[in-house]
Image (cartoon, rainbow, N blue to C red):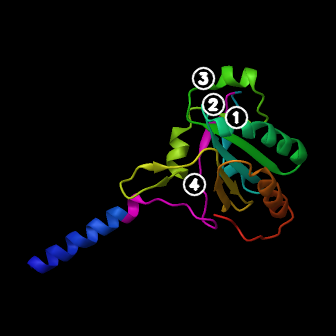
Amino acid sequence: MRTSLLILAIITVFCLSAAAQNRLKVGEQAPTFTTASIDGTQFDLAAARGKVVLVTFWSTRCAICQSEIPRLNELRSRLNGKNVELLALSMEPASRVVPFLKKNRFDFRVISDSFDVVLKYADRDKEGNLDMGFPAYFLIDTQGKIALKSSGWDHSAELETKINSLLAGQTVAARQ
């Protein structure tokens, strides 16, 4: 009986530890979410099936994020008219994001107060702490699966290549 309880306790500890290490992988279904952008329009990831969706997590306080905005705006311009949704999610409140956007044009659909979505997408370490670099990129294919997961500086060329491949119905080796 004692041995059984010990084995059960060990299994429980390993299961809890594994559950705390949340890691979304390329090829997995993207966690769905519904949210409102700062312009008041609604976005529902489940309803966006059939479109390629780029989800970018960023912050007004992140220097790399700020340097990426012009590149992402150029990407937006080149993708104009294509079957793509471009989202920029910030955990910051609208009261901080809106003044920033008045000085810094960002052509994506911008969503503030998105901590609930970050919780679905961020990796977690063994202790359950969030582990996400900024800016972070999740490219979601027309079937709602993660096609690319990346973070850091200057991924616009890689994102554009992958988006165009997804739009053309091609599969490309994904980077994680």
**Dot 4: what SS?**
loop
Q: Amino acid at mark 4?
A: Pro
Q: Name which quarter of the figure residue 172 lies in.
A: bottom right
Quadrant containing the N terminus is bottom left
Q: Which residue is mark 1?
A: 66
Q: Nearer the viewer, mark 1 or mark 4?
A: 1
Q: Are marks 1 and 4 in contact (CB under 8 Å)?
A: no
Label 1 or label 4, whichever comes before in sequence order: 4
Quadrant containing the C terminus is bottom right
Q: Position of residue 83 (x, y in %)?
A: 84, 51
**Dot 3: what SS?**
helix
- The one nearer the camera, 108 or 40, is 108
Q: Amino acid at mark 2?
A: Thr
- Residue found at x 74% / y 21%: 103
Q: Position of residue 142 (x, y in %)?
A: 75, 60
Label 2 – label 3 distance at C-alpha: 8 Å
- Magenta stretch bounds: 18-38
Label 2 or label 3, whichever comes before in sequence order: 2
Label 1 – label 3 distance at C-alpha: 14 Å
Q: Main secondary structure of the magenta part?
A: loop
Horizontal arrangement in the rendering, residue 140 relative to residue 84 (left or right): left
Q: Which residue is mark 4?
A: 31
Label 3 or label 4, whichever comes before in sequence order: 4
Label 2 or label 1, whichever comes before in sequence order: 2
Q: Which residue is mark 2?
A: 60
- Residue found at x 55% / y 60%: 24
Magenta-drawn stretch contains 35:
yes
Q: Which residue is mark 3?
A: 96
